[in-house]
Amino acid sequence: MSSVLQSNPASSPPSAERVAKPTVLVVDDARENLQLINALLKQQYHVRLATNGQSALKMLQQLPYPDLILLDIVMEGMDGYEVCRALKQDPALMELPVIFLTARTEVQDEEKGFESGCVDYITKPISPSILKARVATHIQLKAANDILKDNNAYLAAEVIRRTSEVQAVQDTTIMAMASLAETRDNETGMHIKRTQHYVRLVAEYLSKIPKYAEELPLEQIQILFKSAPLHDIGKVGIPDAILLKPGGLSVSEFEIMKTHPALGRITIEHAEETLVSPSSFLLTAKQIAYSHHEKWDGSGYPEGLAGEAIPLSARMMALADVYDALVNKRVYKPAFSHQEATEIIVKGRGSHFDPAIVDAFLDLAEDFQQIAVLYKDTEER
C-alpha cells in the first residue's frame, strides 16, 4: 500500500475554489477509514491523506500546512501520541490543532491524548455528523486564532512603525533646536555631535562601576545621548553682541552670559508643561542645560552646587564640554593639542571636575581623541 494517498489525482491542478478551502490532513493506517473520512469531508475541505505517522510528518515539512489534523492513535511504527508530541516540539507546527481518532474510550487514554497536545477526540466507529461538527468547529477556531494572530502582528508592527516615526521626529526636533542655539554661537554643529558622543562614552564606562550602575541603565544612557545636544539651548536668549563678541567678555557681559543655563532650563520647562506625564528625557535635558557649568568644588554657576549635589548627567557634560572647547579652535583661542587638554582636565580633578569622571576620561582618552577627529569641524578639515 502506498504510504500517502491523495483525494484528487496529483496531475489535476487545483481550482481556485479548491485552494480556498481549508485543508484537513487525515492520518490513519486503515484504508477504509481514509476513504470514509475523505468521502465525508471532500465537499467542504481539501483533504490530504497519509497512512502512517512518518509519512504525515514528511508531508508537514512542506507548505502550505493543513488547518486541522485528524490523527489515528493506534498505528504501526509511530503511534498517534508520538506523532502529536513531535508536532508540538516543532515551533512551525506546534499550533496546528490535532483531533485524535480512536476506539479507546478509557479516561486515562483521553488524558494521555490531551497531555500529548490534542484538542479533541472522535471515537470509532466514526459518526458522520459528529465528525463533520467537530471538524467544522476546530476549523473555525483555527481561522479565528489565525485572524487574531495576524491582527496582533499587524498592530505590533504598526506600533513599532509609528513609534519609530515619532522617535525620528523627536530626534530631528532636538537636533534642530540644538543647532539653532549653536548657529548663534561661534561654535559649530559638530560640537553638538562630539559632546554627545563624549557623554555616552563616559556614561557607558561608569555604568560598569557598581556605584553608578543603577543610575545608568542602557535606557538612561540613550536618553543622555539624545539630550546632550540641548546643553546650550539657553544661549538662544543671549544678545548677539555678547554671544558673538570675538574678544573676552567684561564682568557685566559675563554675568549676562551666565544666565544661559537658567534660560535653558526655562525653555525646557515650557516644553514639559505641554505634557500629561513627566518625561525622563526632558528631565535629563533640563539637568544638563542648567547645571553643566557647576564645578565639583562649588565655584561654578548658576547655583554654586558642589560634589554629588550636581546631577551626574551635568558632571559628565561639564568635562565633555570643556574638553571639546579646548581641542577646537575658538575666536578667542587656538586649538589645544589632545595632550594639553588632558593636562588641563587633570589639573581640574577635584576642583572643576568630578574625580571619578576625570579617571574615566583618562582611561578613555584615546577614544575621546578619535571622536574629536571623526567629527572635526568642516572648515578645519
Image (tube, grey):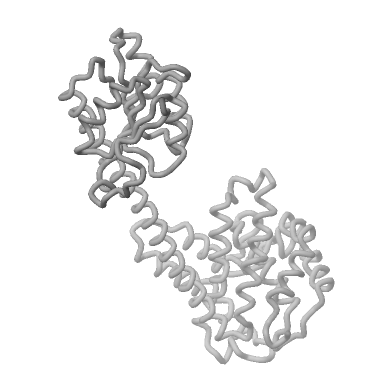
Q: Is residue 215 left or right of residue 9?
A: right
Q: Position of residue 262 (x, y in %)?
A: 51, 71
Q: Position of residue 269 (x, y in %)?
A: 43, 67
Seen at 32% across and 14% down, the residue is 110
Q: Is residue 150 left or right of residue 195?
A: left
Quarter of the view holding residue 97: top left
Q: Position of residue 18 (x, y in %)?
A: 25, 46
Q: Nearer the viewer, residue 314 or 127?
A: 127
Q: Is residue 315 above or below residue 189?
A: above
Seen at 40% across and 68% down, the residue is 271
Q: How many numbered callouts?
A: 0
Q: Is residue 29 above or below residue 352?
A: above
Q: Is residue 170 left or right of residue 37?
A: right
* Quadrant of the rendering where the C terminus is positioned: bottom right
Quarter of the view holding residue 201: bottom right
Q: Position of residue 197 (x, y in %)?
A: 65, 66
Q: Nearer the viewer, residue 254 or 15?
A: 15
Farthest residue to the left: give it. 129
Q: Is residue 309 left or right of residue 152?
A: right
Q: Nearer the viewer, residue 233 or 364?
A: 364
Q: Nearer the viewer, residue 333 or 108?
A: 108
* Quadrant of the rendering where the N terminus is positioned: top left
